[in-house]
Amino acid sequence: MATYDLVVIGTGPGGYVCAVRAAQLGMKVAVVEKNATLGGTCLNVGCMPSKALLHASEMFEEAGHSFAKMGVSVSAPKLDLPSMMNFKQQGIDGNVKGVEFLMKKNKIDVISGKGKILGTGKVEVSGGDGKTQTVETKNIVIATGSDVARLKGVEIDEKRIVSSTGALALDKVPSKLLIVGAGVIGLELGSVWHRLGAQVTVVEFLDRILPGMDGEVAKQFQRILEKQGFAFRLGARVTGVDTSGKTLSAQIEPAAGGKPETLEADVVLVAIGRVPYTEGLGLKEAGVALDNRGRVQIDAHFATSVKGVYAIGDVVAGPMLAHKAEDEGVAVAEILAGQAGHVNYDVIPGVVYTTPEVSAVGKTEEELKQAGVVYTVGKFPFTANGRSKVNQTTEGFVKVLADAKTDRVLGVHIVGREAGEMIHEAAVLMEFGGSAEDLARTCHAHPTRSEAIKEAALAVGKRAIHM
Ligand code: NAI
C-alpha cells in the first residue's frame, strides 16, 4: 500500500497549490522541498521580493519627484538600502509562513530534501543531513520550476555579475547597471535600481523590447522607459564580460555581426530567460521523456511518459508564469480526483510590474495578423480618462482587439498605472466568450481608470464618448 495518494516535488506556486487542491479533494498528500523554505522561486527569489522592491523604490521615487507638485512638501528622501532589504525580507517571510500554514491546515506532510523519481510510485528524498528515504505514493507531480538561463562567456557570481537572485540583494546601488535582455526581469529590476539612482543600459538581442507582447504596446512602453532615463541597445548582444578591473567591461556586438564595442558597468544583470529545472530528478533513469528544449513532455492531462508521473509549471511547455503553474496544479489535482481539470491557455494574463505597468491577455495584433484573423481595434488613451487626468498619471493606453465578424474580444493590452489589476475584467469577459459590445455596455464606476477599458471597447464600434 502506498503511503500517499500524491507526492508533489517542489513547493512553488505550482506545487503547493496542487498539493492544497489535492488535499481538498480528499487525497493524502506530501510535498518534497530541497530549499530551507517553502514557496519556490516566486516567493523567495522571484515575484514576491521583486514586487516588494518595486513598491518601495516607487515610493522613494514618488517622494523625490511627485509629492511636491501635489503640495506635499518633504525634504529629499534618503535611501536606507538595508531597511529596504529588510522590508523585502519581511514580505518574503510573511508569504513563506502563509504557505507553511496552508500545508498544516490541509494536513499535507512536508518532506525536506531533494526528490528523485525512482519510477512509478517511488520518490527518493535525500535530506540535508545525508540521510535518504523512499516515499511510496500512487501519483507524483513534478513541479520543480526553472533556473536562470546562462550566457556563454559570462559567469554569474551573484555579486558583480548577477542573475535576478543577486539583483534582488545588492548591498549598494550600482552607479552603472548593464542589463542583458529586455524581458520582464530586465525591465522590472532595471526599474528598481534606476529609481534608486543607477544609470541603466539594457542590451537586447532583438530589435524590440518585451518579445511576445503586442508590438505597439512595447514601442510605446520603450519610449516611456527612455523618458524615465533607461538607455536601450537593441539588436545587440553581450559576448563576454571582463572582470579583471575595478569596473566590469562588457563586450557588445551587433546581433547581425559587425564592429564590437565595450561598455563599462559596476554590475551586470543577466536576464535572458529561464530554463526548466530537472537536475538530479532522475528523469532519464526513470524514463520520463523530455522535449527538444529540455522540458518535461506531457499530454493534455499533464501525464508524462511514465505512468503515475505528472508535471506542471515552468518545467513543462508554456509561459513561465506563477499563475499558469497554479492553474495547472489545480487542474492536475482535479484530474487525479477523477474530475475534468482544465487550463484555458488562451486566457492567461501577463503583467510587467513597472511604472507604468504593462498587461495583456489573449492575442497580440502580430499573432492575429499571422493567423489571418480579420480584427477591429479599439484604443483609448489615459490622457482622456478623467481619473488619470486628476491624478496626473496619464501615460499609456488600452487596446481592445475584437473579431471583425463576431465582435468577440480576442485580446486586450494595457500600458498604464494599475494595468496589472485592470486586465482581469478582460480575462473574465474572454473566459465567457464576450464581445466588445458586452464590455462597452457594462456599467463602469466613475471615476476609475477602468473606464478606459470600456471606452476602448466602445472605440471598437467607433463610438468612444470621451475621445
Ligand atoms: P524573458 O524571456 O522575458 O526575456 C529575455 C530577453 O532576453 C528577451 O527579450 C530575449 O530576446 C533577450 N535575450 C536572449 N538572449 C540574449 C542575448 N544573448 N543578448 C541579449 N539579449 C538576449 O526572460 P526574463 O526576463 O529573464 O524572465 C524569465 C522568465 O521569468 C520569463 O518567462 C518571464 O515571463 C518570467 N518572469 C515573469 C515576471 C512577471 O510575470 N511579471 C517577472 C519576472 C520574470
Image: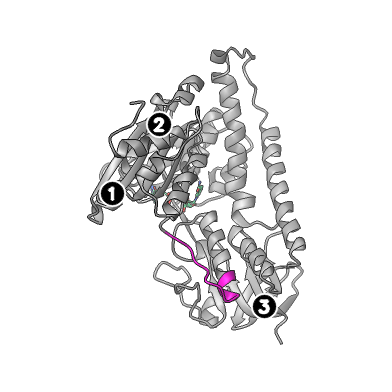
Could you tell me how far apart the alpha carbons at marks 3 and 2 are, in whole angstroms? 49 Å
Could you tell me how far apart the alpha carbons at marks 3 and 1 are, in whole angstroms? 44 Å
First in sequence: mark 2 vs mark 1: 1
Query: Which residue carries the number 1 mark?
Result: 366
- Pick the front one: 190 or 315: 315
Whether disc 1's CB lies below 8 Å from ligand 1 is answered no
Q: Is the magenta stretch mostly helix, strand or loop?
A: loop
Please provide the residue range marked out in magenta.
Answer: 333-345
Q: For the residue labelled by badge 3, is the local secondary structure a helix, a strand or a loop?
A: strand
Please state which amino acid type lies under the numbered disc 2.
Gly
- Please say whether residue 415 is one of the residues in the magenta stretch: no
Classify the position of the C terminus by image quarter: top left
Bin the neighbour count of mark 3 within 10 Å (Cα to Cα): few under 14, some 14-19, many 20 and up: many
First in sequence: mark 3 vs mark 1: 3
Please state which amino acid type lies under the numbered disc 3.
Asp
Q: For the residue labelled by badge 1, is the local secondary structure a helix, a strand or a loop?
A: helix
- Residue at 75% x, 57% y is 101
Query: Which residue carries the number 3 mark?
Result: 5
Whether disc 2's CB lies below 8 Å from ligand 1 is answered no
- Pick the front one: 186 or 443: 443
Tag 2 and tag 1, C-beta contact below 8 Å: no
User: In the drawing, does residue 67 fall left or right of residue 254?
Assistant: right
Classify the position of the N terminus by image quarter: bottom right
User: In the drawing, does residue 380 fall left or right of residue 448?
Assistant: left
- Pick the front one: 397 or 44: 397
Give the percent coordinates (x, y) of residue 407: 30, 48
The label number, if any, that marks residue 396 in the structure image: 2
